[in-house]
């Protein structure tokens, strides 16, 4: 198989997972890295044996010699870097949150479409083994037509020690975490027509909201609740598990803590273990997310080689990003937001 060559921009906290995953992906390798922080560049370059190192993305693109770019920086730089990739006609992966605003996100999708290059958002949560298991079970038809769902992520985990910037933004849990949970809701129950949200800030040490409850009306008529919290202290910490409940006309699916998957249907009750694999470079409790990073990067590589659209393409992600914008609008103004108007 021809090895696709990639360049990674942004050698921070999460990029370590992406670099490990690139070592495991079949058909692609990272040949150059870039970070404006010389210390991060050295740490990642030395750890993964990458000789080509850049402190400036413009210099990286000018030198070229790679087939795609993996943008793992924080949101502030995403639009400029995606547009730089489009200008050089280099296919791009961009971390979530895709952009600062929906209009920036639309401009980024357009820039890549005009340049005829693939663009994928690194929206990895739908690639988690337990989430894929729920989707397969629903698609099998065993619970009939889904009419209600709940996608829940409630935790007291200290995310601020690894990602201090999360405490500083005016926006927190919807933009950083519910963005994934909303994407899972779309992945499982389909696109959304209207949204209503309520938010709270419980932790006085942070600027943004750390609790959100969001109600979605899906195009297929189902209603779902996306509820997320980083202010929920439990006996057994579930981080970073997303728990799911789906009610269908013929039965129910329950993904509960510890990756326990229960399906109730006319045939009775089955319980299975939907645990992710613990990859050699992974560590608990992050292994669920780490495995999904490998899955999404393999998906990108396969699609780049075959020419097909990715599951979380830029165009697809606009529909998730619109839910984020709508949730802040709904919570701020106490109204229900029509998603079609935003897209
Ligand atoms: P970080 O601050 O630890 O790392 C970002 C790195 O990018 C830093 O080293 C910084 O110097 C570098 N950088 C920023 N702008 C740059 C530019 N213009 N050119 C070159 N280098 C630049 O952040 P992080 O915690 O690793 O998060 C990165 C992104 O990953 C965020 O958008 C975050 O939301 C996302 N993230 C995703 C997941 C997931 O599961 N998908 C999990 C955690 C974080």
Image (tube, helix red, strand yellow):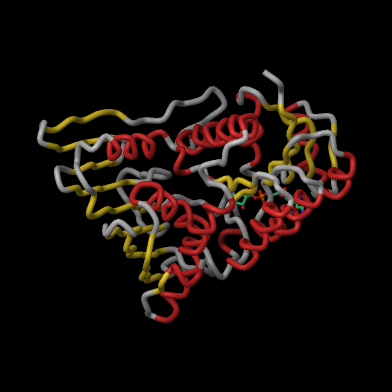
In the rendered image, is residue 327 in sight?
no
Q: How many marks?
A: 0
Q: Quadrant of the N terminus?
A: top right
Q: Residue furthest bottom?
A: 333
For this view, does 203 lie left or right of residue 145?
A: right
Please, is residue 46 above or below residue 154 in the view?
above
> Which residue is depicted at the point 46% across and 26% down?
278
In the rendered image, is residue 115 in sight?
yes
Quarter-of-image position of residue 92: top right
Please, is residue 307 above or below residue 221 in the view?
above
For this view, does 271 lie left or right of residue 329?
A: left
> Which residue is depicted at the point 67% across and 53% down?
113
For this view, does 269 lie left or right of residue 179?
A: left
Quarter-of-image position of residue 338: bottom left
Q: Nearer the viewer, residue 291 or 203?
A: 291
Q: Nearer the viewer, residue 196 or 266?
A: 266
Q: Position of residue 282 (x, y in %)?
A: 53, 29
For this view, does 160 lie left or right of residue 271?
A: right
Q: Nearer the viewer, residue 118 or 241?
A: 118
Q: Position of residue 214 (x, y in %)?
A: 36, 64
> Which residue is depicted at the point 59% across and 48% down?
121
Q: Position of residue 241 (x, y in %)?
A: 38, 43
Q: Position of residue 185 (x, y in %)?
A: 37, 52
> Which residue is depicted at the point 19% across and 47% down?
248
Q: Nearer the viewer, residue 80 or 241?
A: 80
């Amino acid at each position: 198989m021809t090895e696709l060559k990639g360049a990674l921009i942004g050698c921070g906290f999460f990029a370590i997972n992406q670099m490990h995953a690139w070592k495991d992906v079949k058909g692609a390798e990272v040949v150059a890295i870039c970070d404006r922080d010389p210390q991060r560049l050295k740490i990642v370059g030395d750890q993964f044996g990458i000789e080509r190192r850049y402190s400036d993305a413009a210099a990286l693109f000018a030198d070229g010699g790679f087939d795609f770019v993996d943008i793992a920086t924080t949101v502030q730089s995403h639009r400029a870097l995606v547009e730089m990739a489009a200008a050089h006609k280099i296919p791009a992966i961009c971390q979530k949150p895709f952009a600062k605003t929906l209009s920036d996100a639309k401009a980024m999708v357009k820039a890549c479409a005009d340049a005829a290059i693939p663009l994928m958002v690194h929206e990895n949560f739908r690639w988690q083994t337990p989430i894929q298991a729920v989707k397969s079970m629903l698609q099998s038809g065993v619970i009939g037509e889904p009419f209600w769902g709940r996608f829940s992520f409630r935790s007291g985990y200290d995310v601020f020690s690894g990602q201090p910037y999360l405490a500083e933004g005016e926006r927190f849990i919807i933009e950083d975490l519910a963005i994934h949970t909303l994407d899972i809701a779309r992945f499982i129950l389909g696109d959304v027509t209207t949204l209503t949200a309520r938010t709270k800030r419980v932790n006085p040490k942070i600027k943004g909201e750390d609790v959100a409850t969001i109600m979605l009306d899906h195009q297929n008529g189902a209603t779902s609740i996306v509820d997320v919290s980083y202010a929920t202290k439990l006996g057994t910490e579930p981080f970073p598990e997303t728990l799911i409940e789906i009610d269908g006309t013929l039965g129910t699916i329950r993904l509960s803590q510890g990756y326990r998957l229960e399906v109730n249907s006319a045939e009775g009750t089955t319980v299975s273990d939907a645990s992710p694999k613990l990859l050699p470079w992974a560590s608990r409790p992050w292994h669920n997310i780490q495995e999904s990073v490998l899955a999404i990067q393999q998906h990108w590589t396969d699609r780049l080689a075959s020419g097909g659209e990715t599951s979380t393409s830029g165009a697809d992600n606009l529909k998730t990003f619109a839910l984020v914008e709508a949730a802040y609008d709904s919570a701020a103004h106490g109204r229900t937001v029509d998603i079609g108007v935003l897209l």
